[in-house]
Amino acid sequence: MFDPKLQTPLDDGETALARFQPDRGTYIKAHVMLAVLGGLAATLGLALIGNPYPWAGIVAGVLGVGTRGAYLMKEELAMQWTLTDRALLGPGGRRILLGNIRTARKLGSAVQVVTISGDKHLVKFLSDPDAVRARIDSARGTAQ
């Protein structure tokens, strides 16, 4: 699902090496897990304070996270990142020069890219975040 309005264009002479797109299945799994864990925490919290209807916590958690996830799915799944021979290009005009990347690390189903100045960017909902991190490190010349 490519939306050219959300993508950062390549500079003249710049070559795309790889494109990283969110995975729909990973997005859904992450939201199901968040809904269940959040709902269980809410249920436990309501039970601990003596609420006579602690089951409302799981209902609220599932409905809240499910509604949010469904509402934002199309937008989140359109967030493509492009790795070029010069930079990592993200949605909304983000351009991170390869030489400005301090580290790329896996965070669940995402890769967090940290710049030398401390800015942090998330490439989210990846089916294989380890491969994406390795690809970024390889392009930077810091493969581990």
Image (cartoon, grey):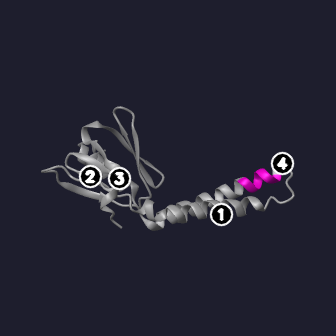
Which one is closest to the eye, mark 1 or mark 3? 3
Q: Residue at x 50, y 61 (%)?
A: 72
Q: Nearer the viewer, mark 3 or mark 4?
A: 3
On screen, 43 above or below 112? Answer: below
Mark seen at residue 83: 2
Give the structural element (helix, strand or loop) at label 2: strand
CB atoms at circles 4 and 2 under 8 Å apart?
no
Of the image marks 1 and 3, the number of the one nearer the N terminus: 1
Q: Residue furthest front?
A: 5
Q: Which residues are magenta?
A: 42-47
Residue type highlighted by circle 4:
Ile
Q: Which numbered disc flags the more N-terminal residue, 3 or 4?
A: 4
Q: Please state which of residues 126 and 68 is positioned toward the viewer in this rendering.
A: 68
Whole-angstrom CA distance, mark 1 to mark 2, is 36 Å
* Mark number displayed over residue 49: 4
Instruction: Looking at this view, name the residue that lies furthest to the left.
Output: 13
Classify mark 1: helix, strand or loop: helix
Q: Which residue is mark 1?
A: 62
Residue 13 image offset from top left, x and y in percent: 12, 51
Q: Position of residue 99 (x, y in %)?
A: 25, 38
User: Is residue 29 visible to the viewer in this orientation of the structure?
Assistant: no
In which image quadrant can residue 143 be found?
top left
Q: Which residue is mark 3?
A: 91
Please tell me how crowded label 2 is: few (under 14), some (14-19), or many (20+) other residues with Cα within 10 Å: many
Residue located 44% across and 58% down the image:
125
Which label's residue is closer to the chain start, 4 or 2?
4
Q: Residue at x 40, y 55 (%)?
A: 129
